[in-house]
Image: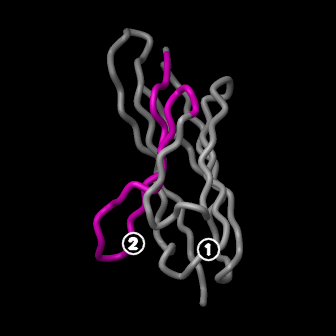
Amino acid sequence: QVQLVESGGGLVQAGGSLRLSCAASGSIFSINAMGWYRQAPGKQRELVADITKGGIPNYADSVKGRFTISRDNAKNTVYLQMNSLKPEDTAVYYCNAEGLNFLRARFGSWGQGTQVTVSS
């Protein structure tokens, strides 16, 4: 079983910054992609950014140039630096990780979510 624990959400004014962290633990053999998704009230969950094991990032158009995803493979941790935040960035942010467990079986895990609220 693989667990993801997020931290770093909160309340910030428009134009401000926040940094989210997500640490994976448990029966991990290897982690391939890690990513951040978000879900605003009344909307579907959407991809914000993800990153390959080799460090290649991918961003939603709405956050390009403002958010930066990174990861520390030694710590099984992924980060999301969010700058120039806008009220429309308000959502619950979820971490996701995909890889292989100790039995070499694929896993896909989600964190519990962390609230990000941007006031205007």
Q: For the point 49% across and 35% down, which residue is it? A: 3
Q: Quadrant of residue 23?
A: top right
Percent x, y of residue 45? 33, 60
Label 1 residue SS = loop
Residue 16, by quadrant, is: bottom right
In this picture, residue 9 sits left or right of residue 87: right
Q: CA distance from mark 2 to mark 1?
A: 15 Å
Asked whether 95 falls inside the magenta stretch, the response is: no
Q: Quadrant of residue 97?
A: top left
User: Magenta residues, as a range?
Assistant: 30-55
Q: Residue at x 40, y 31 (%)?
A: 98
Query: Considering depth in this image, is 57 or 88 the residue closer to the camera?
Result: 57
| Disc number for residue 40 | 2
Which residue type carries mark 1? Leu
2 or 1: mark nearer the eye: 1
Above or below residue 90? Residue 51 is: above
Residue 53 position in % (x across, y down): 53, 27
Furthest residue to the top? 103
Q: Is residue 35 above or below residue 19?
A: above
Residue that numbered label 1 is attached to = 85
Q: Is the residue under label 1 in contact with that under label 2 (CB below 8 Å)?
A: no
Say if the magenta span includes residue 52.
yes
Q: Amino acid at mark 2?
A: Ala
- Quadrant where the image shows the C terminus: bottom right
Which secondary structure lies at badge 2?
A: loop
Asked if residue 23 lies left or right of residue 109, the reply is right
Q: Position of residue 118 (x, y in %)?
A: 59, 79
